[in-house]
Image (tube, grey):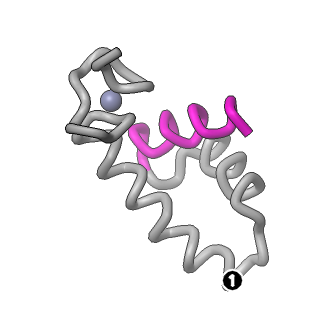
């Protein structure tokens, strides 16, 4: 399996995501640092919110949905 977990693009090295989704993942993590502080959301609650609202972009939403499937 050498494809991104979310799309059909090849992934980067040992990563589970392609370049674009990897970047989206780090954006997710970075934004979570702020959201957790402001709203007291758990990681899963935060991901659900992102998946619903798509507030930080379609790539991040796809990554959020992927993570939620495995929680
Ligand atoms: Zn991808």
Which residue is painted at 24% across and 21% down in the image? 9
**Residue 69: percent from left, percent from top:** 68, 30
**Residue 38: percent from left, percent from top:** 69, 83
Element carrying mark 1: helix
**Residue 41: percent from left, percent from top:** 76, 68
Depth check: 34 or 69 in front?
69
Which residue is painted at 35% across and 35% down in the image? 17
Q: Is residue 50 left or right of residue 30?
A: right
Depth check: 1 or 67 in front?
1
- Membership of 8 in magenta stretch: no
Characterize the local packing of mark 1: few (<14), some (14-19) or many (20 or more) Cα atoms within 10 angstroms.
few
In terms of image quadrants, where is residue 27?
bottom left
Depth check: 3 or 7 in front?
3
Q: Quadrant of the C terminus?
A: top right
Residue 23 vs 13, above or below: the answer is: below
Residue 36 vs 17, above or below: the answer is: below
Q: Is residue 9 left or right of residue 24?
A: left
Which residue is painted at 49% across and 64% down in the image? 29
Residue at mark 1: C-beta within 8 A of ligand 1: no
In terms of image quadrants, where is residue 59?
top left
Residue that mark 1 sits on: 38
- Membership of 58 in magenta stretch: yes
Q: Residue furthest bottom?
A: 37
Label total for image: 1
Q: Quadrant of the N terminus?
A: top left
Residue 63 vs 69, above or below: the answer is: below
**Residue 10: percent from left, percent from top:** 21, 23
Residue range in magenta is 57-71
Which residue is painted at 26% across and 40% down in the image? 20
Secondary structure mostly taken by the magenta-highlighted segment of the chain: helix
């Amino acid at each position: 399996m050498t494809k991104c977990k979310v799309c059909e693009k090849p992934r980067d090295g040992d990563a589970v995501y392609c370049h674009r989704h990897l970047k989206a993942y780090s954006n997710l993590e970075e934004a979570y640092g702020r959201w957790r502080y402001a709203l007291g959301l758990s990681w899963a609650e935060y991901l659900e919110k992102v998946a619903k609202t798509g507030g930080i972009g379609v790539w991040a939403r796809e990554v959020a949905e992927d993570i939620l499937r495995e929680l």
